[in-house]
Amino acid sequence: MEKNSQHFGFTLSPVQTFLAGIGIGVLILCTIGFFILLGIVLKGGVDVSSSGSNGNDVVAVRDTAPTPTPAPSARVVPPVAADDYIRGNEDAPITIVEYSDLDCPYCGRFHETPKEVIAQNNNVKWVYRNWPLESIHPDARRKANGAECAGDQGKYWEFIDAVFVANAAGGANTDTIAAQLGLNVSTFNSCIAQGEFDSKVQKHADQALAAGCRGTPCSFILKDGDAPIPLDGVVPTASVLQLIAPLL
């Protein structure tokens, strides 16, 4: 039995009804496709991985600093200074220099890499320089100063390790960490409050920007006479050892 559809005073034949249905279906599909495409475009604006500048695949995840990047020719990575803390063989010819934020989760992930590298290779030492990204981590500068104040009591590396462990467990309280490390907590807090090492923290932050760092962690492999080798983001131990091998 043939039936006609009647709406708003006019009549559609079965063929017209069929064609109208196809048209409506195509319109719905186009609309859905538009929103799917829009989502892909928007996601394309977030880049969480890339290849390292040396051709090695790395996970370039980091907290980004809202600062411009200088041209490569203008980048400078200062060598080990008298006020730097060194981990590993102090006489090692190769240095990993890291600019890091104690509240950066990616820095916490990368922290194990230099540890493993210096444990496996006595020709490498590690220098950790604080670069707090205060725009996204409001308490990072206090922790950076805390590391320096802990270092003044002989516990620089212990404090940094403890902060990353505490962050991974849900949050770091500097007073608690200071007490656990056996520091004089009153002296420690006074040191932070008076900003005794804030100029050093700022110096390292300025160095990171001059070196072309765009976020944390930002690290470099240094050897006298050679150009710095950048380590972008969270680089695995095997990749770092691979980059170091030719330098030896």
Image (cartoon, helix red, strand yellow):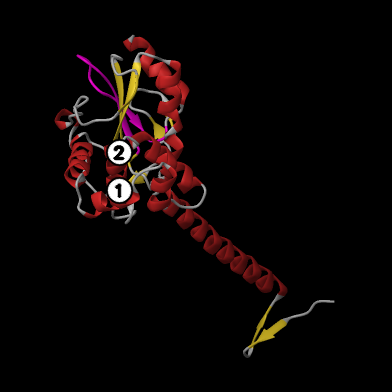
Say if the magenta span includes residue 99.
Answer: no
Q: Are marks 2 and 1 in contact (CB under 8 Å)?
A: yes
Q: Eyeballing the image, is 45 above or below 9?
A: above
- Which residue appears at 45% of the width and 31% of the height? 112
How many C-alpha atoms fall within 10 Å of the one at disc 2: few (<14), some, or many (≥20)? Answer: some
Highlighted magenta segment, given as a residue range: 217-234
In the figure, is residue 227 to the left or right of 37? left
Sequence-earlier tag: 2 or 1: 2
Q: Which residue is mark 2?
A: 153
Q: Eyeballing the image, is 68 above or below 1?
A: above
In the figure, is residue 238 to the left or right of 66? right
Task: Please identify the residue farthest to the right as the structure is shown.
Answer: 1
Q: Nearer the viewer, residue 211 or 171?
A: 171
Q: Quadrant of the C terminus?
A: top left
Cα distance between the residues tagged 2 and 1: 8 Å
- Which residue appears at 24% of the width and 55% of the height? 193
Q: Eyeballing the image, is 23 above or below 82?
A: below
Q: Nearer the viewer, residue 90 or 241?
A: 90
Is residue 202 among what the camera can see? yes
Across and down, in percent, residue 18 comes to 68, 69
Across and down, in percent, residue 183 comes to 36, 43
- Point out which mark residue 188 bears: 1
Is residue 48 among what the camera can see? no
